[in-house]
Each structure stands twice: as C-alpha cells, then as structure tokens.
Amino acid sequence: MGQLAVTGGTPVRTQGYSRWPIWDEREVEAVTATVRSGRWGGYPEPGPRAAAFASAFAEFHGAKHGICMANGTITLIIALRAAGIQLGDEVIVPAYTFAATALAPMEAGAIPVIVDVDPENYCIDPRAVEAAITPRTRAIMPVHLGSQVADMDAIMDIARRHNLVVIEDCAHAHGARWRDVGVGAVGHLGSFSMQSSKLLTSGEGGIVLTNDDHLAQLCHSLIDCGRPKDPEGKEYTFGANYRLGELQAAILGVGFSRLAEQTATREANAAYLDEALSEIDGVRVLRRDPRITRRACYEYIFAIDPQAFAGAAHEQVCEALSAEGIPVWQGYPAMHNYDLFRPGMSRHPIAQLYADRFDFSKLQLPEATRAAESEAVWLNQRVLLGDRAGVDQAVEAIRKVQRHAHELTA
C-alpha cells in the first residue's frame, strides 16, 4: 500500500467541493412564474425574459447588444454568418480549445486554420496568427481559455491591419475584463456558452455580444428563421430557429444576479493559488497578463514538469490528484489529435470540398501538443468557489503527489 490515495493511501480531502450549478428557490420561483405565464418559447423573438437577461449581460460587459441563442456553438456559427463569412473563407482558430471553435467556421462554410498557442497562457499566439494570414483570411477567433484572456491588443492590431473580423470565444470568460472592457465587447462579436459546466448556466444556451447595430440585427434575424430585424423590415436572412426559450432565460436571469460576487471569489482564490503554486518546483503558473483587469476562472490551469513528478505520465498525475479529492482533468487534446474534431470521418462537406486543407499530418503545433499531452492540469472552478482551506488542500495534494510520484511510475 502506497501513500497516495490512488495507490491505497488516505486522500487529502474527503469531502466534496461546492456543488455546481448553484441554485436556490429563486430559480424555482422564476421557472414557476414562467410556466404559469404560458410564455415558454422564444417566439416572438426575443422573449421578454431573454431580452431582459441579454440587456443586463451586455451592460455588465460594456457591450451595446446581447442576442440570446440556443447554445454556445450556435453563437459562434451565427456570429460568423452575421460577419459575412462565406464558402472557402479562412478563419484562424487556436489549436488548444474545445472542438466547437474549429467546427463553427465549417458550419458557416469556411476553413478553420488551426494555429499554435502561446506557452505563457495557452491562448492563441498572435505571432502564429500573423504568419497564417493569406488573401482568403477573413476572421480570427481567439479563445479566452481557463482563467486567461488572449492578447486582444495584438489581435485587434492584426485585424485592423489586415481588415479582418474578430470573434471572441468567451465560453470560459463570463465577466472577465481586458483593459477594463468586458471580453466579448473588445472584438467585433463575442460568443458565450451557458452550458451546464459554464460560469453562468441554464443547462444549455448562449449569447452573442456586439457593439455594432447592424451585426446585432443580422444575429437576431439569423436565429429567428430569417425574419427581418432592421427598422424598415426588409432585410431578410437565410436563418433558422436558434432562439433561446423563456424557461432557460428565467434561470439565467437569477444566475446572473450571483455572477459578480462569484467572479470576485474565484478571482481572489486564483490569486492566492498563483502565489502558493509558484513555490513548488516543477509547477509553472501561467502568466496573468496585467491588462486583465477582472479575471474569470472557468478552470484554473497550471503546468507541470513531468520530470519533477518522477517522470509520471500527465494523465497519471491528474488521476492521482483526483483520487486525493481534488477535481482536476488533463484538458482538451490539441485540435489535430481531437477525437471530437474529425471532419474527414464525419464526411463534413467542407472537409470533402477542401480535403487538402484537412491533412492534419502537416500541422506543427508543438506548444498545444505539449500542453495537452504532458503539461496542463485543469483545476475545476468549484475549488475556487470554496473557502481558503479548500484551496490549501488542493496545494497540499499537489505537493503530496509530487513527493510520492515514484508510486505512479513503480
């Protein structure tokens, strides 16, 4: 019997962390009132609860418009379509992200151009973006990953110089601010997911933010079966029903009332964790850019040096920490190795039409591959929602796993 919980020892933490999602009777009352109202769906669009939530969420991020949608993949697709992305256009996306970021351009008819990430924060590398631009490039989709924000100054500068659209994937970043501007309001459009694990959730759902009146009108039209939303009522689109229902909007309205306080709690605990982990040899804290003026923490990501853990495999370290009662996982695969992103296997029409562009054997993505396969440990945000003692136990577990890592390799 070893010292580590995974080899038979006693775990550091035996009680769970905060539940997620957090809810109380206010959600029950809001949903009950919506049921009794008889107004359940999203038509006419937007519904009153969806409109109220969209307005409050947009204001919180400093955006002029918010458009609620069915989920956080649809938000990316609709943002691309509203921006005028067409067949054969190229959209630059990071290699280290959820599969939807690369799928969305394909659903809009475009080719996702996958580029590497910055090892300092695991977000898209502006240098890789610049190197990937061709005459067919039309958009950049930076992802604000975990607790980080992509370098929006550099990305917006590139976009201005090359006349590109910037669509921020903010699925992890509800409430984050860059130079005191809310993410999603820095680029031309911003996409947020309200899926079950996200920082603000209604089970499923999403929202697009923009400061552009015309883009907002197009988004509303595209999710409402193409109905015109311009003042003259003449600008139809080839849209479909991607509206958010009023039952989900009711839940979001209540959840939003907690977002600011929860964000502050997670941010304070993340800062404490930065300092604590910085003292552990073989553990690297991702650099927090000083231009991030409010930090949202969907997952707290840090990097390990496997050699400092007796050469144990990345997955073994994550399994050992989980056994110690600390909710972690190893994160996304790099996009060219992602089982969920296999456009050739799915016979996606874009992959068939541009087959040569989906030969992943040509991709060189060393930083994303290193993060995915040997470095990155994703600590669940529930740890950051609890008290300082819970954070200390997470640090203690990391030290313990490192101290007894030889048990993992024996």
Image (cartoon, rainbow, N blue to C red):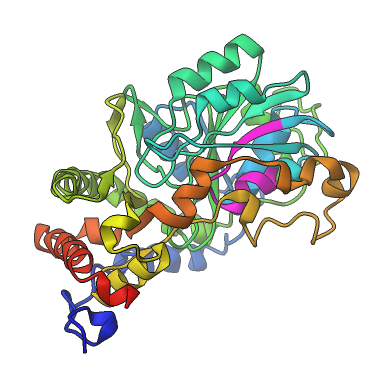
What's the magenta region?
91-104
Near-viewer residue (36 or 4) = 4
Q: Quadrant of the C terminus?
A: bottom left
Near-viewer residue (299 or 285) = 285
Quadrant of the rendered structure where residue 178 is?
top left
The image shows residue 179 at horizontal and vertical percentages of 33, 22
Look at the picture and state if 69 lies above or below 65. below
Within the magenta stretch, is there residue 97?
A: yes
Look at the picture and state if 332 lies above or below 83. below
Look at the picture and state if 293 lies above or below 170. above
The image shows residue 193 at horizontal and vertical percentages of 51, 50
Within the magenta stretch, is there residue 64?
A: no
Residue at coordinates 49% horizontally, 63% vertically from top-left? Answer: 203
The image shows residue 159 at horizontal and vertical percentages of 59, 17
Horizontal side of 350 relative to 408 (left or right) equals right
For the question of whether residue 42 can be seen, the reply is: no
Q: Quadrant of the N terminus?
A: bottom left
Horizontal side of 6 relative to 71 (left or right) equals left
For the question of whether residue 368 can be seen, the reply is: yes
Q: Residue furthest right?
A: 353
Near-viewer residue (373 or 129) = 373
For the image, the number of numbered tags is 0
Horizontal side of 250 relative to 383 (left or right) equals right
